[in-house]
Image (spheres, helix red, strand yellow):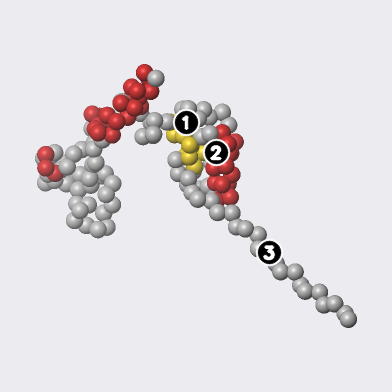
Amino acid sequence: MQMADEKTRLIRERAQKRATFRRQGASRKKKLEDTWRRPRGLQSKQRRQYRAKGRHPRPGYGAPAAVRGYHPCGLREALVFNTAELEGLDPEMFAVRIGGSVGMKKRSAIQAKSLEYGLKVLNPKEITVPEPVEEPEPEVEEDE
């Protein structure tokens, strides 16, 4: 219990310390994505690290080593592409993330198997199984 409390405390600490690093000019130009790119301009205030121009990624923003790679729910993530990879995963330690290239047919099998094993799926999708359409039977005419 003591270890779990320490782990949740470190995960909360990681969340509070996490910074958002904004790309220079992302708010001015629509075509620029808001993912970090290092500023390279000679007159760039962000490159010269003026305080008001945005933070730079630095080692101090990293997560504590004890919880690095953990999901906010407190479990380690396991990337899964088929049902065979689910075997041997401990539901107390791992949560499952289904790969993005997995189709709906295999995804539904993975979700069903992980539910059977008691594993948490981090990116579940609602699987709707199409119901079979019943065809009306042709009416048989009776001869009188």
Q: Is disc 3 placed on a helix, strand or loop?
A: loop
Q: Residue at x 11, y 42 (%)?
A: 52
Q: Position of residue 46 (x, y in %)?
A: 15, 43
- Nearer the observer: mark 2 or 3; the answer is 3
Residue 134: mark: 3
Q: Which amino acid is tagged 3? A: Glu
The residue sitting at 28% across, 34% down in the picture is: 15
Badge 2 element: helix
Task: Tell me the quarter of the image containing the N terminus.
Answer: top left
Q: CA distance from mark 2 to mark 1?
A: 13 Å
Residue lying farthest to the right in this orientation: 144
In the picture of the structure, the residue carrying the numbered disc 2 is 115
Image point (39%, 30%), residue name: 74
Question: What is the C-alpha distance between the residues marked 1 and 3?
Answer: 42 Å
Q: Are marks 2 and 1 in contact (CB under 8 Å)?
A: no
Establish if 3 lies above or below 97. above
Name the residue that disc number 1 marks: 94
Tell me which residue sits at (11%, 39%) in the image: 51
